[in-house]
Image: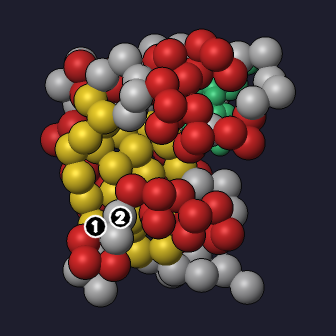
Amino acid sequence: MATNRTFTMIKPDAVKNGHIGNILKDINDGGFKIIAMKYTHLNAETAGQFYAVHKERPFYKDLVEFMSSGAIVAAILEKDNAVADFRTLIGATNPAEAAEGTIRAKYAKSIDANAVHGSDSDENAEIEGNFFFSSLERFA
Ligand code: ATP
Ligand code: MG
């Protein structure tokens, strides 16, 4: 059964390129409510932990290096059917294949620097939200 929360990061490329405001506007316009949010950064260790599920993939080392290369914005978002609807809002992993109007189509430059992260399941949304936020840091 679909639950109502997902987790996102605005990645270092989008932060560096000045897209935080536009991406948050798209998230709000998409009907998502922000439950928790922080401007922070990952280092090699914490990025490695966050993306541990990909550690056997050929792009893992580059992914960890990229995700620890600058500031990010982490947030927990709420909406009915949040995980699937958010992945629709952000578009395909490769921005060249992302549908017109999606966040990655508008703000991402490449498959590795692809502007935003979105959880891929309810279970991972919970794990990823807990990775960044304690219960004291959530609105509800
Ligand atoms: P994310 O988990 O960041 O929301 P995703 O779920 O669309 O993205 P995943 O398969 O989980 O895609 O891959 C995680 C991240 O690893 C991607 O967002 C992308 O930055 C990077 N990545 C995935 N595939 C490749 C690839 N073939 N080459 C380079 N980087 C890749
Ligand atoms: Mg993923």
Q: Decide if ligand 1 comes within 8 Å of the CB at mark 2.
A: no
| Location of the C terminus (image quadrant) | bottom left
At label 1, the amino acid type is: Ala
Residue at coordinates 53% horizontally, 49% vertically from top-left?
Answer: 118
Which of the two discs, 2 and 1, sits closer to the camera? 2
Q: Position of residue 48 (x, y in %)?
A: 58, 32
The image quadrant where one finds ligand 2 is top right
Tell me if residue 79 can be seen. yes
Q: Residues within 10 Å of mark 1 (few under 14, many from 20)?
A: many
Q: Which residue is mark 2?
A: 133
Q: Does 72 sit left or right of 65 as displayed?
A: left
Q: Position of residue 39 (x, y in %)?
A: 21, 44
Tell me if residue 65 comes above or below residue 72 in the rendering: above
Q: Which residue is mark 1?
A: 36
Q: Quadrant of residue 77?
A: bottom left
Q: Does 96 sit left or right of 28 as displayed?
A: right
**Dot 2: element:** loop
From mark 2 to mark 1, how far is it between C-alphas? Answer: 8 Å
Q: Position of residue 47 (x, y in %)?
A: 50, 34
Residue at coordinates 50% horizontally, 31% vertically from top-left?
Answer: 45
Look at the numbered discs 2 and 1 and tell me whether their residues touch, using CB distance below 8 Å: yes
Residue 29 or 8: which is nearer the viewer?
8
| Location of the N terminus (image quadrant) | bottom right
At label 2, the amino acid type is: Phe
**Dot 1: element:** strand
Q: Which mark is residue 66?
A: none
